[in-house]
Amino acid sequence: MNLFGEDPRILLFSLLFKLSNGKLPRIPYVNTASRDRFSLYLPSTRSAAYKRYLNQRIRKMLKLPSGPDAVTIAVTHRCPLRCPHCSAALFNKSEELSTKDIKRLITQCVDLGCYNITFTGGEPLIREDIVDLVKYAAEQHVVVQIFTSAANLNINLLENLRKAGLSSLHISLDSPCPHEHDSLRGVEGLFDKAILTIKAARRKGISVGISTYATHQAIKTGKLMELIRLAEKLKVNEVSIFELIPTGRLLHASHNVILTDDEKNHLRSLYVKHSHDPKRVKIWSWSYIEYDVRYAGLKYLLNPEALGCLAVRYMIHITADGYVTPCDFMPLSFGNVMDEPLTKIYRKMKNHPIFRRINNSCLMQNPDFREKYLLNISNESQLPYPIDDIRPP
């Protein structure tokens, strides 16, 4: 896919971008993750990746053919933790992709127009070649992120990741309380290790985010706000607030784990409040990003970050053994990159009845979608489950 395509409208936007010299003015009352990045998920305005980002957004706005903005790649199944909310816990544990396989995959992602490669797991830092993979991805001019528990991090690895071109490091924190975090993750002392890692990464000039998830209890007790205050004290660049999704070990859990509308509105308000105050830590709230754009109201529709469900249209996920799923929370496989090119698999995904239209809110929280595609997946089934084997009622 050509960077700006052949459409004259794309060429016009390209010209305007070049004339501006790739520099965006700072806007009063708009918070950013850093001086040149609106969010850690987006590229620097001074980078070649920013042109790819503009290309993707413009193509989607004009309803032109486009690929995924971001690809999350689980580079390993292995993990020293046992988190109750893990989305990958029940995935098939067959042979992991080799270094050569992942590099070839990264190239295919870039060819689709992707500007964000995020390494996940398992615990991605268990991979002996993780620095090499980060370096290769950075050389393709994309945002390179790692989501980690920090369990396997040390100073030398941090420095090597920085030199390799890591764009940002996201550290998981489930609670502001050390004992509660360690209990949820199953490793004593992990909270303290995470805090030390955040401080060390910031000293080295690495952009750092805290990744957490919101629950009924965390919102009700105020612990989510405590965690945000801790993030501000640590001077991290951004806090990503996910919602607890019924997937992985929670795939067949009660729908009661899904946040209420009032709780989601609370998270959206936090996003807006922190977006307009540069003195606060930047918040990336998935309750806002995946807000139902049909009912969002003018103040959300005017903000391009309210996108509806991100699966397939904006992102895809690839498991450690090569299966391609719509996102890292949706355990449905559309093929394996070891059997066919990613381009062919992505075309199949976009042509599937689920994704031919824009899905206005998170599908994994949609009762009708869950009943049609997930309800009949047994607890004994290996995940991700082949989409072709599902016969919707």
Image (tube, rainbow, N blue to C red):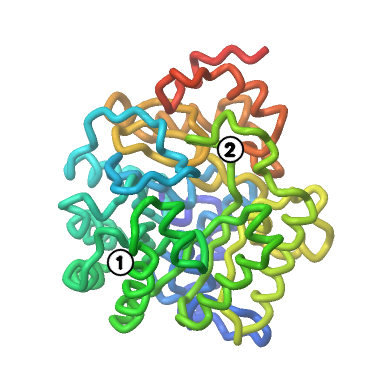
| Residue type indicated by callout 1 | Leu
At horizontal 21% and vertical 50% (from top left) the residue drawn is: 127
Q: Is residue 168 visible?
A: no
Left or right: 294 in relation to 392 = right
Left or right: 191 in relation to 245 = left
Q: Is residue 160 above or below residue 334?
A: below
Few, some or many residues within 10 Å of mark 1 (<14, 14–19, 20+)? many
Say the numbered circle drawn on residue 246. Answer: 2
Say the numbered circle drawn on residue 166. Answer: 1
Is 153 in front, or is 347? Answer: 153
Say the numbered circle drawn on residue 70. Answer: none
At horizontal 58% and vertical 28% (from top left) the residue drawn is: 252
Q: Is residue 134 above or below residue 235?
A: above
Q: Secondary structure at mark 1?
A: loop
Q: CA distance from mark 1 to mark 2?
A: 31 Å
Q: Quadrant of residue 374?
A: top right
Q: Position of residue 283 (x, y in %)?
A: 59, 69
Contact (CB < 8 A) between labels 1 and 2?
no
Q: Position of residue 251 (x, y in %)?
A: 55, 32
